[in-house]
Amino acid sequence: MANAKEQLIDWLRDAYAMETQAAEMLERQEGRITNYPEILAKVKEHIQVTQRQADRLKQCLQRLGSDTSAIKTGIAMLIGNAQSISGVFAEDEIVKAGIFNYSFEQFEAANYRALIAAAQHCGETEIARLCQESLDEEIEMANWIEQRLPQLTKTYLQRKEQGAAAEAKR
C-alpha cells in the first residue's frame, strides 16, 4: 500500500491528465460552436483557465519531487479527442456539449475536493491552496453553464424551428 504522499502524487497525476483531457475537448468544441458567440467566448476563456490549472498541478508535482505521467496524459488526450469527436455526429451537439461540460466541471470539482483533503492530510498546505484555486474556477464554470443551459437549449430549439443553423458549425 502506498503511503499518503505517494497516493497524493498519483492523484495529482490523474488530475493533470484530467485537465489535459478537458483542454483537448474544449479546443475541439471551439471550432464548432461559432453559432453561439457567448458560449464560444466562455470556452476560449476556459481553455486558458484549464491550462493554468494544468500548470498548477505540475507545480504541485514538482513540490513533491515528481512529474506528470506521460502514459496517463496520453490516454486522457485520446479520450478527450474521442469525446469531442463523438459530438460531431449529433445534430444537437451544442446542447449535448453543454450537458457534458456541466457534468465534467462537477467531476473536476470533486477531484479537487479530494486533492485538497489529501494535501491537507499530508501537511502540504501550498498544494491544498493551489488546488483550492482550481476548485474555485471549476465551481465558477459549472455555475456559469448551469445558469445558461436552459436558455442554450431554448435557443437551439428556436433556431431549429426557424430553419436557422441550430447545430454547432462543423
Image (cartoon, grey):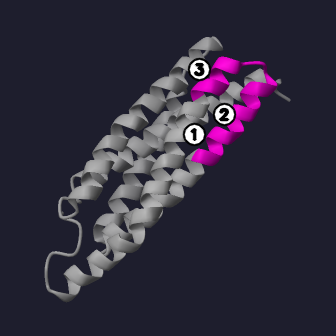
Residue 132, image x and y in percent? 60, 33
Up/down of 66 relative to 54, above or below: above
Residue that mark 1 sits on: 135
Which residue lies under the disc numbered 3?
Answer: 60
* Earlier residue among tags 3 and 2: 2
Q: Amino acid at mark 2?
A: Trp
Toward the right, the furthest residue is: 1
Query: Could you say whether the residue bearing mark 1 is in a helix, strand or loop?
Result: helix
Residue drawn 64% across and 22% down?
A: 127
Separation of residues labelled 3 and 1 (CA atoms): 14 Å
Look at the image and give the residue range highlighted in magenta.
109-130
What element does badge 2 sit on?
A: helix
Q: Quadrant of residue 162?
A: bottom left
Identify the mark nearer the N-term, 1 or 2.
2
Which of disc 1 and disc 3 is earlier in sequence?
3
Quarter that holds the N terminus: top right
Residue drawn at x 70%, y 20% as measured from the top left: 125
